[in-house]
Image (cartoon, helix red, strand yellow):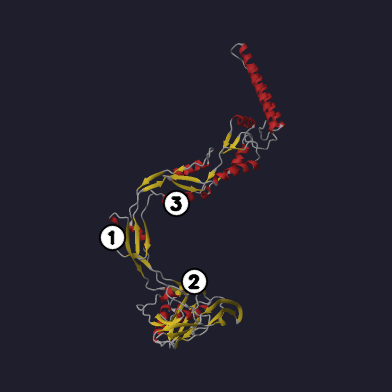
Amino acid sequence: MNAILYNSDNDNSSAMTDEVFEEAKQIIENNSDTKFSGPKKKSHKLLIFSICIIVFIIILGLLSTIFALLNINNTNIISGITILGIDVSNLSKDEAFSKVSNDLNTRLNTNLVFNHNDELYNVLPSQLECSFDVAGAIEKAYSYGRSGNIFQNNFDILNTYFKKVNIDPDFVYNDNLCNSIIEQMNSNFADGLKEPSYAIDGNNLIITAGKSGSVIIDNELKDLIVDKLTSINYNTDSINIPTIIKDASSIDIDKIHSEIYKEPVDAYYTKDPFAVYPSSNGVDFNISIEEAKNMVSSPQDSYTIPLKTLYPNVTTDDIGTEAFPDLLSSYTTSYTSSNSNRSTNIALAASKINGKVLMPGEEFSFNGTVGKRTTQAGFKTATVYSNGQVTTDVGGGICQVSSTLYNSVLKANLEITNRVNHTFTVGYVPIGLDATVSWGAPDFKFKNNRSYPIKLVATTSNKRLTIQVFGLKEDVEYEVELVSYRTGSVPYSTVYTTDSSLAKGKTKVVQSGSNGAKSVAYKVLKLNGKEVSRTLLSKDTYSPHNQIIARGTK
């Protein structure tokens, strides 16, 4: 017999037998002292009945003792116990834990399938952080037939032979994650409720009207999930999602305005300690709130409200150099040989860079700062290189500005994020230390990787361009040296074209040839005059200027 009796031994059984005899003796003595008003026959029957009770109690005690002795060494869960329908009869705690855990883990890693109008949604219970207290259930199973007195324990053990006892483990899930999954399913319903929404598109606020539709009844669905996962008769059938139809809310212009409205913020700085607080633009409706309310009062699928930018009185770039006490770097190039148009372009591009402030971590874009080079913006037509030939275009010459900025940024030990060398070598910076730009691409970019904001100061005077970087020196400040040199040559080729103005057999040199070059550039960091690092900046190849000869066809 696989029954278990917890904490039963011979001493306890003997003690109980003695107690029973004492109780019987007391009953007999009480009966002998009692004076009955009825006949002696009635007293005799009562005595016999009392003796029978005593004998029954003695026999029951003996049987319980024998039953306990037979099962005292059983250390497994008693027979007839299940946990959520999983039979753990006669298993040790460890065996039961392994069996139940494996079964329930399979359940928790099987998709729950939700159905709404033939739309199916799969969710793993693990996504809801569902879990069973298997250990607690094992303890309850093990305690069954051990936690009461000797009679109760033996009764429990005998009872499980005729009727199985099931234990439901405690079950929990993450309510917030469940709400999130429900919200996601709500948003995916084809017939779901669509509340009013809005988005900013450029200078316009687009408001989309709401639409009535189906909404999940949260508590009912959660109960269905719990019932599914904690059922003894577990199956993988889909769960029909309980829903109700709800009307969409009306468009609340006051609420939307309060959410999108933003005051502009003026920039300012402090000196003790040095800190720069940047400006930020604000935003507002470009019509009155009443006009906006009138607009949305007529039924439409969407509405467009114009927006306006609110500018601060003091921008970050307006902060003076007094907020940037230390000169971190300076680099100068000359354009004395440039014509007036090229000089104009250089001065104009420099003016657009001048005063630019970058907060820590902020990235600078040359094209984004200078803008498109157009005649409307004030740029002139000047010499450029295009497809291997000298030609003219609007904005010619501004690559000298980007190259000068590149060198100044390097000397401030800032992080270069995008730089492209010219197609041909240039004369205003050393080989390998130039940076070409063109509207759209390529662009020159760098990031302020310092812990304090920086300010660019670009000036032109006597056909000399100087770009300085101001900021605040850090605890360890390196001296930066730029080293570049030519590593090879790229021979030029001769290209022939035709010229109908030349006599046949005659030739004319349209463009003289010159070799291209290969180069390498390094950034050297020094501390107290001693080199501490040498970083490769680039290995560049510059194309040759091919010799172009025209042949006459006249």
Residue type at mark 2?
A: Pro
Task: Residue 77 in the image: state x and y as whole percent.
Answer: 64, 37
Disc 1 is placed on an element classified as helix
Residue 490 vs residue 213, the one in the foreground: 490
Instruction: Report the residue marked by disc 1.
Output: 290
Residue type at mark 1?
A: Glu
Sequence-first disc among 3 and 2: 3
Which of the 4 quarters of the picture holds residue 3? top right
User: Label for residue 360?
Assistant: 2
Disc 3 is placed on an element classified as helix
Q: Check disc 1: other Cα within 10 Å, few if <14, some if 14-19, many if 20+.
A: few
Q: Check disc 3: other Cα within 10 Å, few if <14, some if 14-19, many if 20+.
A: few
Residue 125 vs residue 506, the one in the foreground: 506
Residue 48 vs residue 191, the one in the foreground: 191
Gap in Å between the C-alphas at discs 1 and 3? 35 Å
As drawn, 203 above or below 119: below
Mark 2 touches mark 1? (CB < 8 Å): no
Task: Residue 206 in the image: state x and y as whole percent.
Answer: 35, 60
Residue type at mark 3?
A: Gln
Gap in Å between the C-alphas at discs 2 and 1? 42 Å
Numbered label tally: 3
Sequence-first disc among 2 and 1: 1
Instruction: Report the residue marked by disc 3.
Output: 184
